Amino acid sequence: MTVMYFRQIRDLWEDSDKMKIEIAEYWHMQRSVYHRYELGQREIPVWAVIKLAQLYNVTTDYLLGLAEKKR
């Protein structure tokens, strides 16, 4: 199984003032799990993509690399 890597997730995190542990807590998961999502080592569930889009105020299409505009 191939897992997709979404560069936008890392870019959004780098541009924010949030720590990875804060994002992981927002998702109710361990930081290591979030980190695996970010690296593409683990598949991101749909619910997590939606919550991440809400957290960063971007579209899911942007997160998935389907749109260049964040909103």
Image (spheres, rainbow, N blue to C red):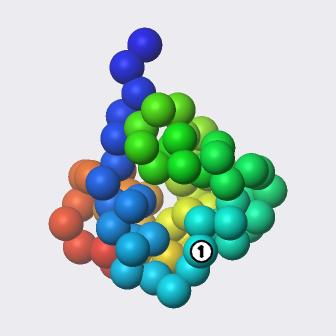
Residue at image position (19%, 66%) is 68
Q: Amino acid at mark 1?
A: Met
Q: Quadrant of residue 7?
A: bottom left
Q: Quadrant of residue 71?
A: bottom left
In the displayed structure image, the side of residue 25 where residue 45 appears, left or right: left
Q: Quadrant of the N terminus?
A: top left
- Vertical relation: 51 (above or below) 16: above
Residue nearest the observer in this picture, 57 or 10: 10
Figure disc tally: 1
Residue nearest the observer in this picture, 45 or 17: 17
Toward the top, the furthest residue is: 1
- Vertical relation: 43 (above or below) 1: below
Q: Residue 28: in sight, yes or no?
A: yes
Residue at image position (42%, 43%) is 39
Residue nearest the observer in this picture, 58 or 37: 37
Q: Secondary structure at mark 1?
A: loop
Disc 1 packing (10 Å; few <14; some 14–19; many ≥20): few
Q: Which residue is mark 1?
A: 19
Residue nearest the observer in this picture, 47 or 5: 5
Question: Residue 58: image x %, image y %?
Answer: 42, 73
Residue at image position (51%, 44%) is 37
Residue at image position (42%, 38%) is 40
Question: Residue 63: image x %, image y %?
Answer: 38, 58
- Vertical relation: 43 (above or below) 33: above
Toward the bottom, the furthest residue is: 17
Q: Residue 61: in sight, yes or no?
A: no
